[in-house]
Amino acid sequence: MLDLFAIEELLSPEERMVRDTVRAFVDAEVMPCIVEHYRAGTFPKHLIARFGELGLLGANVKGYGMPGLSSTAYGLILAELERADSGIRSFCSVQTSLVMGTILLFGSDAQKSDWIPRLGRGEAIGCFGLTEADAGSNPGAMRTTAKRTKSGWLLNGSKRWITNGTLAEVAIVWAKTDDGVRGFLVTSNTPGFTARVMHGKLSMRASDTAELFFEDCALPEGALLPASLGLKSALMALTQARFGIAWGAIGAAIGSFECARDYAVTRVQFAGRPIASHQIIQQHFAEMATEITKAQLVAWRLAELKDAGKMTPVQVSLAKRNNVRMALDVSRRAREILGANGVCDDYPPMRHAANLESVYTYEGTHDIHTLVLGKALTGIDAFA
Amino acid sequence: MKILVAVKRVPDTTVKLKLKPDGTGVVTDGVNFEVNPFDVIAVEEALRLKEKAGGGEVIVATIGSKDATQQLRHGLAMGADRGILVVNDDDNAIDADVVARTLKAVVAKEQPTLVLVGKQSPDGESNQVPQMLAEHLGWPQATFASKVVVAADKASAEVTREADGGLETLSVRLPAVISADLRLNEPRYASLPGIMKAKAKKIDEFTFESLGVAKAPKVTAVGFFAPPERKAGAVVASVEELVNKLKNEAKVLG
């Protein structure tokens, strides 16, 4: 695997062992089934129990019997998963960062001990509902509401583009209340709650993407995440998840790069020479390797900052924005090197590229992260 | 039931190794190392036997440089209880007999009911250590095991071996030495919680001197050579030419 700047030397023995374990697992159990699921538009549900057994879900969570790995180890896990498919990484990102992470940040002790161990073992699956049909980059425009009742809350509205939506036993739903936006834990058996698969995706086909509907859902008082106060709480959870995306995207890029390299040194055209001997192809590899290496260094440093408690949302925006654009560019170049073969799903680059169109857009679009950086650098908010 | 598993640090079996220019060994810089895959199977079997017995201890032991603690940690991450490292800086300076006598000294310290090892390592491929160890200990041995069943009284084990023509089943008294073949089991992954727990597990270090083992190999490696590169094949124009070449050049047809 590409490692021109010897990132390997920066890893602890445990981090290497974690990476090697997940790499072996991905090669043996995810790679053989991913294309079939991508074609069918289904998530490989049989892997969920395996994720739980291996400790991939909530791997960076400390306490509650979770592994408590470093941020670097967690990032390496996500890169290995995304080397297989962005949809696999998304499943684990949502479960770990957006669901377990949100409960740990804003939940009560009872909510934490009720949910964290089961989510970690993969016995329960969670999803995170913030985005709505008419509230994407501007989540403040959400229409979902939670009104106080005598015994709790009454939830009405809908959410869209929700990863793990139909698989989930518990949804974290963000809704407007009289005190601003709050987060709620909504179990899928709540009367009035329905989840519907979104069809027709040309990207993330091996991921469960759903619409969630809430019609007069009566929630107990204990459903409220007590420490969630305002939209900024939801954005805090997203910052953690975007950290993982900055790492995961490297996996999709390396998967594409390695495939194209293997292909280019064996594919012969013009006088018996491999296409890798041609200058334009070599330029592609030089560009790809340079950009992957830069992204690796950004991700590694970001993990160091995160573990030191110094990671800022601006750094996360830079890393997510850079690394996902890098991965999208690398996967497209890799597809190009593969020629016509590149448009078949026998080879991963075009699947990665299609997936990365979603990654480019979700968890803060590329453009929104551009404007976050613009605001931080100039002091002027382009939205104001 | 106490089980000792000997593991070896070997170069990643999926990479192509290069020889040092002076022919004294292989280039190890930039090469990833792993646990001998047969030894991983042995660790797995030990863990399963312990789980089946509902208790006991699995000890992983290796002879190697301090870097070999990584391979012990792999066994500990899979679930072994503690590790033993016998420090040795030059693998080429010892032979299978030194390894066997060193393991005998470790067995004398630990008094296990069973020693499990991989049938051979992919670097040396000598397939001698388990047999020599059994001989030095005066214990029964069962090599190339594809199935191991320990009797309820832990006084014997039934071992199925893969022989050329089929399967052979042996009964060995315990304590014994058993070497693991490829189809004995499918090893588990080192789980992430297991990797974190392994950090806190104890690894005791010994030297040959502290174990009273003479580092006196009977066999020494004299040199390493790569096999000659295969010459490119030739395309023949006709069946007649092919038959002619097979007769007169390759001399495989009369």
Image (cartoon, coloured by chain):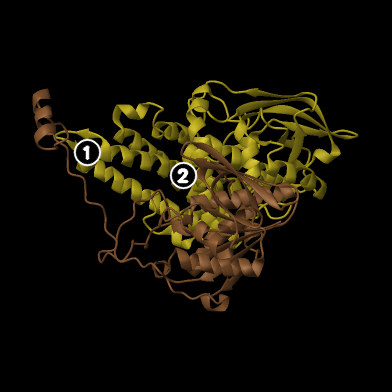
Chain colours: A yellow, B brown
Q: Is residue B69 left or right of residue A191?
A: left
State the image coordinates of residue A128 (x, y, percent, origin top left). 66, 37
Q: Which residue is mark 1?
A: A274
Q: Tell me the crowding category of disc 2: few under 14, some 14 to 19, or many 20 or more residues within 10 angstroms, Cα based.
A: many
Residue placed farthest to the right in the image?
A150
Q: Is residue B22 left or right of residue A313?
A: left
Q: Nearer the viewer, residue A228 or A113?
A: A113
Q: Which residue is mark 2?
A: A251
Local SS, label 1:
strand
Which amino acid does the dot numbered 2 rest on? Gly
Q: Nearer the viewer, residue A72 or A136?
A: A72
Which amino acid does the dot numbered 1 rest on? Pro
Q: On the same chain: label 1 and label 2? A: yes
Q: Nearer the viewer, residue A37 or A372?
A: A37
Q: Separation of disc 1 and disc 2 at Cα?
A: 26 Å
Residue appearing at x 37%, y 50% in the figure: B15
Q: Is residue A39 left or right of residue B26?
A: right
Local SS, label 2:
helix
Q: Nearer the viewer, residue A224 or A347?
A: A347
Q: Judge whether residue B231 can be spotted in this image.
A: yes
State the image coordinates of residue A287 (x, y, percent, origin top left). 31, 47
| The N terminus of chain B: image quadrant | bottom right
Determine the chain carrying the residue at label 1. A
Quadrant in the rendering for residue A269: top left
Residue appearing at x 52%, y 21% in the figure: A200
Residue appearing at x 36%, y 68% in the figure: B220
Whether label 1 touches label 2, CB < 8 Å? no
